[in-house]
Every structure is written in structure tokens, then in C-alpha cells.
Amino acid sequence: MKKRYYGDPRFYQLLEKMATIHSNKNHDYAGDDPLSNFRMSEKIGIPAWKGCLVRMGDKYSRICNFAKQEKFEVEDEKIEDTLLDLAVYSLICIILHTEKNK
């Protein structure tokens, strides 16, 4: 039986888009470990979940600059792309933080 969702259908479409983004980027970045690029920070003593926070800060900074200027210098980037990246990073950060605390 298929689960019924009660939120805005666009929300669930965005969740599917996030899954696709995560999968595609893992194909390009990761080998056996789908989060290996986030674990790179551990090589210099920074826990992976904190390294992920730095990447989230970069995305947040782009969003703030966009809010001020209402445009990106990279013309093929959209605010939606940056926000989706931030959402994906948030979920990855939860995974990495949970792993650290096990």
C-alpha cells in the first residue's frame, strides 16, 4: 500500500529532486563511500559534520548575497539550485553527526 502524504505535492517533488541531485553528485565525487568528499576534512582534524557545516555556510553566504543583489554572477545558477544544495547538505550533516555520536 502506498503511503499517503498530506503536504503540498511540490514539497515531495523537491524531495525527489534532492535525491536525484545527491545521487548524481555521488556518482561524480564518491567511490565506495558516498560521503567520502565530506570526510576529507577529517584529514586535517576537522570532523566531517563540521566540514559539512562550512560548506553549508558557503551556500548560505551565496543566498544572502543573492538576496542583496537579486542575481548570481554565474548566470546558469539559480537560487533554487543553491537552496536545494543547502537542503541536501543539511541531511548529509545529520548523517555525519549521527555517525560521529554512535
Image (cartoon, rainbow, N blue to C red):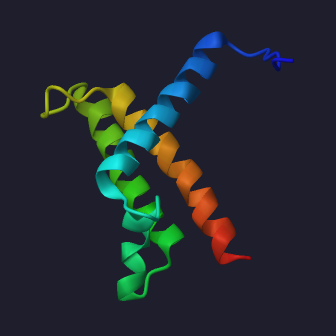
Rendered residue at 38%/26% (across/down): 80
Taking the image as shown, residue 18 lies to the left or right of residue 73, namely right
Q: Please tell me whether residue 99 is drawn above or below residue 11 in the rendered image.
A: below
Residue at the top extreme, as displayed: 9
For residue 46, side relative to residue 5 (left or right): left
Residue 77 point in image, percent of width and height: 23, 30
The relative height of residue 58 versus residue 78 in the rendered view (above or below) is below
The answer to which of 57 and 31 lies nearer the viewer is 31
Quadrant of the drawing holding the C terminus = bottom right
Instruction: Say left or right for 100 vs 5.
Output: left
Image coords of residue 66 (percent x, y) = 28, 33
Quadrant in the rendering for residue 54: bottom left
Residue lying at 39% horizontally and 50% vertically, measured from the top left? 26
Q: Position of residue 72 (x, y in %)?
A: 19, 31
Pick the quarter of the image with the N terminus.
top right
Q: Nearer the viewer, residue 42 or 1?
A: 1
Residue at 44% x, 42% y: name it: 23
Relative to 90, is 83 on the left or the right?
Answer: left
Q: Residue furthest right?
A: 1
Task: Name the residue located 56 percent from the left edge and 18 percent from the top edge.
Answer: 13
Rendered location of residue 9, percent (x, y): 64, 11
Residue 19 lies, with reference to residue 14, above or below; the image says below
Residue closest to the eye, 9 or 86? 9
| Number of numbered labels in the structure image | 0
